[in-house]
Image (spheres, grey):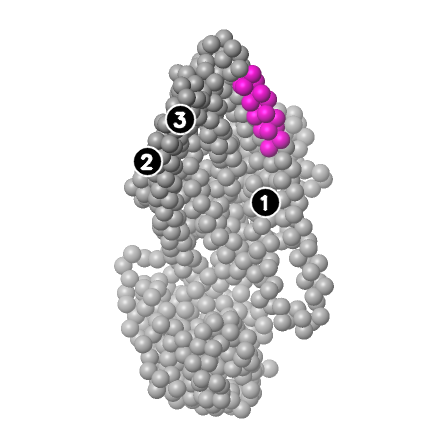
């Protein structure tokens, strides 16, 4: 077997050490499970317990984990007979902390560990490990995946390579035009030498005008190519934006529903915003860096041909700047990552809270909102301050080196003129080239900061692209109509082993009107999401028309079985746009659906009727009106099965009674989930969720929720 690569995952939150270790171990075995995915699989607000760690390390049974306690005094003997890697529970500052131990070298008595609180994999002595370890190990057995995992930087270079390959022609044209721009800049620099060394000494005043016209032409040509390069970069940026954004959203619609349930809207948005930084790095920074590198090499060669002594001075300066860059590399990496992550937290917080500002105002919690914001934004300011201090120190060091270099450079150049080894025009020409080169050197020096930010952006972006999708069979059936829903021995529990319900059996036929009731947390909403395939069930627990639910294509399943919840989705646009959502539906059909949903009279009273403009989230409508519009939209889509999860909970009693009457006359199968038991006698089947079970009553007179 080829040499195995060791992986390190940096913890982000205070209690993320366990989940970071689990991610590192999974990636070691070739399973690309990021911290994002693992935290969705088993959310925890505190440090992960040993039991939770075992659950984390048992996803799809890729790994087998057992907990052992060893004698710390016999650690050498233990390490000689143990399988690597393993996770050790340690004590740091009197708190539990997890680290991954990859290997032990008995000759040097050193262990190679991945401590999530550090920046990378480190080597520690056996005595250090004995002091920090609690002697509790999670021993792991696993089979290597056929697909290799990638580190953050590997993901970065793979993405960059893919982008460059797909946009190679635009990048090459941009680069070639940039080379022409550099050549024209060098030609322009000769103007000083010609004027000082030839025109003035020879008093060629008649030639000055012609020379001026030639170099004005060079400047105009220079400007034209700068314009063309800018146009190419704009086009390249636009193509990159389109490509990266499409990949991101195409991935989002393939993800499991718990991905969206477990994170704030702002986090998803902030990761999408990372696209703009990636695009900027490729279209501008990457192309400029290639050009800057060519400029430094070519101008260095020209200076060497003119005067080797000045070239040696320049080379020494470049080496010092390079050493300075390496010295600051680590701190820039840390500061850049921390700043980007805290910015994402601030954006996420603002998006989440601004959406609920009316509630914050009504509860008189403006001060609480401000205090929370100051806390979140304060972390961003701290990260920004550290980044600025680090950048300020780096800039100051660069300024001192550059200042000293120019003094030394001009002094040695003056000596060369005195020694007749160089003319004044030559020195002005070389100085012009060096000044031009300084811009390129500055670009290469700042590249590391942009590179670190791009690595973080790509890591956050590719974490979404690599997020495991729902597994679907290759050959899919097309579901044309739902005739039967057969539920057999259905049980469901969350990864933390909390059982929602178990051993549920239920048969629903076409046209059945079923009402589901039960206390909050009894599993009604989970049951609804399982029926429509938003949550995964075990094979053959849910069968549609006699076939397993996963045998059908997702598109046809969603078309025939639809679920809406208590919070309706309405976007900024007209009522008509919100109801049809791109479908070709006549006004007559729309009005009929609104009649069945008891919102026709409301629409008729609004200015413009169906063309009335709804604000974002429908804030200019009442909650009951919003729910009725969402229900009308569902009627227009005409599915075989309608599942309403408290979808009409805010509708007034009179309107609700009429909606029920219309609902009973519909041909669709309806599963209605509600807490309101006063108006449900119209339904012919009742399901009670209680004590992890369901109970069914058929006779309306027998139905008593209590």
Residue toward you, 699 or 360: 360
**Residue for point 53% across, 15% down:** 414
Q: Which residue is pictured at 48% across the width and 16% down the height?
A: 310
Q: Is residue 672 above or below residue 320?
A: below
Which of the two marks, 2 or 1, is nearer to us in this view?
2
Q: Can residue 442 be seen in this view?
A: yes
Task: Identify the magenta region.
Answer: 395-411
Q: From the image, tell me which residue sits under label 2.
A: 176
Residue receiving disc 3: 205
Q: Where is residue 7 in the image (x, y as percent from the top left)?
A: 49, 36
Who is closer to the viewer here, 582 or 201? 201
Residue drawn where x is 60% and y is 58% of the image: 349
Residue at mark 3 to residue at mark 2: CA–CA distance: 37 Å
Instruction: Using the numbered discs, state the Cα–Cα distance from disc 1 to disc 3 in whole angstroms.
Output: 59 Å
Q: Earlier in the sequence, mark 1 or mark 3?
A: 3
Q: Residue 175, relative to residue 529: is it above or below?
A: above
Q: In the structure shown, which secondary structural element does the residue marked by tag 1 occupy?
A: helix
Alpha-carbon span between mark 2 and mark 1 = 35 Å
Q: Mark 3 and 2 residues: CB-CB less than 8 Å, in contact? A: no
């Amino acid at each position: 077997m080829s040499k195995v690569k060791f992986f390190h995952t940096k913890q982000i939150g205070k209690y993320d050490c366990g989940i970071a270790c689990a991610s590192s171990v999974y990636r070691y075995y070739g399973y690309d499970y990021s911290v994002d995915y693992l935290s969705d699989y088993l959310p925890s607000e505190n440090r992960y317990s040993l039991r939770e760690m075992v659950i984390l390390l048992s996803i799809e049974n890729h790994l087998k984990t057992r907990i052992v306690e060893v004698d710390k005094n016999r650690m050498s003997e233990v390490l000689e007979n143990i399988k690597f890697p393993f996770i050790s529970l340690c004590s740091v500052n009197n708190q539990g902390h997890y680290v991954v131990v990859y290997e032990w070298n008995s000759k040097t008595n050193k262990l190679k560990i991945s401590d999530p609180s550090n920046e990378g994999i480190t080597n520690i002595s056996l005595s250090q490990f004995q002091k920090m370890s609690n002697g509790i190990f999670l021993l792991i057995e696993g089979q290597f995946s056929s697909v290799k995992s990638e580190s953050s930087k590997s993901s970065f270079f793979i993405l960059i390579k893919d982008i460059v390959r797909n946009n190679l022609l635009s990048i090459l044209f941009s680069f070639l035009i940039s080379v022409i721009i550099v050549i024209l800049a060098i030609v322009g620099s000769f103007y000083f030498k010609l004027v000082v060394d030839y025109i003035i000494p020879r008093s060629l005043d008649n030639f000055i005008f012609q020379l001026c016209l030639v170099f004005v032409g060079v400047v105009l040509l220079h400007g034209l190519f700068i314009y063309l390069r800018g146009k190419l970069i704009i086009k390249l940026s636009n193509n990159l934006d389109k490509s990266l954004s499409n990949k991101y959203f195409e991935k989002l619609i393939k993800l499991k529903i718990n991905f969206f349930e477990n994170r704030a809207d702002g986090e998803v948005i902030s990761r999408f915003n990372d696209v703009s930084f990636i695009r900027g790095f490729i279209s501008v920074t990457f192309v400029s860096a290639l050009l800057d590198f060519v400029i430094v090499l070519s101008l260095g060669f020209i200076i060497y041909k003119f005067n080797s002594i000045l070239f040696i001075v320049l080379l020494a300066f470049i080496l010092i700047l390079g050493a300075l860059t390496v010295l600051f590399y680590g701190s820039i990496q840390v500061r850049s990552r921390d700043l980007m992550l805290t910015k994402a937290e601030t954006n996420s917080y603002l998006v989440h809270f601004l959406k609920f500002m009316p509630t914050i105002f009504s509860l008189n919690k403006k001060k609480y909102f401000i205090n929370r914001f100051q806390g979140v934004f304060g972390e961003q300011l701290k990260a920004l301050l550290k980044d600025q201090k680090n950048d300020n120190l780096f800039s100051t060091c660069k300024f001192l080196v550059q200042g000293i270099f120019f003094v030394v450079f001009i002094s040695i150049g003056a000596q060369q003129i005195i020694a007749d080894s160089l003319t004044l025009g030559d020195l002005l020409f070389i100085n012009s080239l060096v000044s031009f080169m300084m811009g390129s050197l500055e670009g290469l020096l700042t590249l590391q900061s942009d590179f670190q930010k791009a690595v973080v952006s790509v890591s956050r972006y590719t974490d979404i692209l690599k997020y495991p999708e729902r597994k679907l069979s290759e050959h899919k059936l097309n579901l044309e109509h739902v005739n039967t829903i057969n539920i057999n021995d259905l049980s469901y529990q969350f990864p933390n082993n909390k059982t929602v319900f178990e051993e549920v059996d239920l048969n629903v036929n076409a046209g059945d009107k079923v009402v589901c009731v039960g206390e909050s947390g009894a599993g009604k909403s989970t049951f609804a999401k399982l029926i429509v395939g938003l949550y995964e069930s075990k094979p053959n627990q849910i069968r549609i028309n006699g076939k397993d639910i996963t045998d059908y294509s997702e598109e046809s399943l969603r078309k025939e079985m639809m679920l809406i919840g208590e919070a309706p989705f309405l976007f900024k646009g007209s009522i008509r746009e919100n109801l049809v959502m791109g479908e070709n539906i006549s006004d007559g059909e729309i009005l009929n659906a609104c009649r069945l949903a008891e919102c026709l009279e409301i629409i008729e009273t609004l200015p413009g009727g169906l063309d009335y403009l709804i604000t974002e989230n429908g804030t200019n409508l009442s909650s009951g009106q919003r729910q009725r519009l969402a229900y009308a939209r569902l009627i227009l889509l005409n599915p075989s099965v309608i599942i309403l999860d408290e979808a009409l909970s805010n509708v007034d009693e009179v309107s609700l009674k009429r909606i029920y009457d219309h609902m009973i006359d519909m041909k669709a199968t309806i599963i209605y989930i509600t807490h309101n038991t006063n108006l449900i006698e119209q339904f012919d089947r009742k399901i009670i969720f209680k004590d992890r079970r369901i109970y069914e009553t058929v006779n309306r007179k027998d139905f008593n929720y209590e």
